[in-house]
């Protein structure tokens, strides 16, 4: 097979590792950019809530990656395992590790279901999706009037669309060998 100019041949596992690094980088950047807006909406987060916000942003970005690269199922499965394995490592006993991994998998599946349900195909405006994401990010999935905020939904909508483009651009650099 002839590879495109400048494409690097990698495995699905390698792609998943690169996507994980990509996800963490974008998550950190979005957290830093978005965190002050949360205060401006009238939410004051505890340290625990800030940690949960970071986790929710990672799940949002995993969903964006999955939505963008639906044809790379093997790499996406490996990417999800990285996320789940990280939760497993937070526990001490084998039972707790199993429970943490199961909880992480369930949370990810629930977010994906909710986000796919709000995605508007063919639309550049993902306000309904953005509001749903804000609910998980800030109010544990519950509605709150303060989340209907033009700046925050615009920021999140812009993040979703720009990250999708970045994911697709990142992916173009590689040819999967397996």
Image (tube, rainbow, N blue to C red):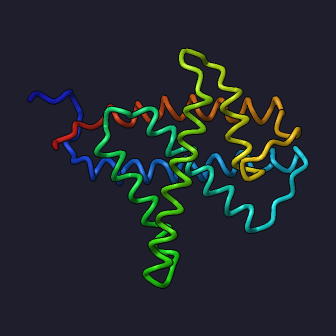
Image quarter where the C terminus lies is: top left
Image quarter where the N terminus lies is: top left
Left or right: residue 32 versus residue 139 is left
Foreground: 1 or 6? 1
Residue 119, percent from left and from top:
58, 27
Report the residue at 21% width, 48% height from top.
11
Q: Quick check: 147 above or below 44?
A: above
Left or right: residue 148 versus residue 54 is right
Foreground: 109 or 52? 109
Left or right: residue 112 versus residue 118 is left
Report the residue at 69% width, 48% height from top.
136
Report the residue at 81% width, 60% height from top.
45
Residue 128, percent from left and from top:
70, 28
Left or right: residue 174 versus residue 101 is left
Residue 175, percent from left and from top:
22, 36
* Residue at the far right in the pictured view: 42
Residue 134 lies in what quarter of the image?
Answer: top right
* Residue at the far left in the pictured view: 1
* Residue at the far top in the pictured view: 122
């Amino acid at each position: 097979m002839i590879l495109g100019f400048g494409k690097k041949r990698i495995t699905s596992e390698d792609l998943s590792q690169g996507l994980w690094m990509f996800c963490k980088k974008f998550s950190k950047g979005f957290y830093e950019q978005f965190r002050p807006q949360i205060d401006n909406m009238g939410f004051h987060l505890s340290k625990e809530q800030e940690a949960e916000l970071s986790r929710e942003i990672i799940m949002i970005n995993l969903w964006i990656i999955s939505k963008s690269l639906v044809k790379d199922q093997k790499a996406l499965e490996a990417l999800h395992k990285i996320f789940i394995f990280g939760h497993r490592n937070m526990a001490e006993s084998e039972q707790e590790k199993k429970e943490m991994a199961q909880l992480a998998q369930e949370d990810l599946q629930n977010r994906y279901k909710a986000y796919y349900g709000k995605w508007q195909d063919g639309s550049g405006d993902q306000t309904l999706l953005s509001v749903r994401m804000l609910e998980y990010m800030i109010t544990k999935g519950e509605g709150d009037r303060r989340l209907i905020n033009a700046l925050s939904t615009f920021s999140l909508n812009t993040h979703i669309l720009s990250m999708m483009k970045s994911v697709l651009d990142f992916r173009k650099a590689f040819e999967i060998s397996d």
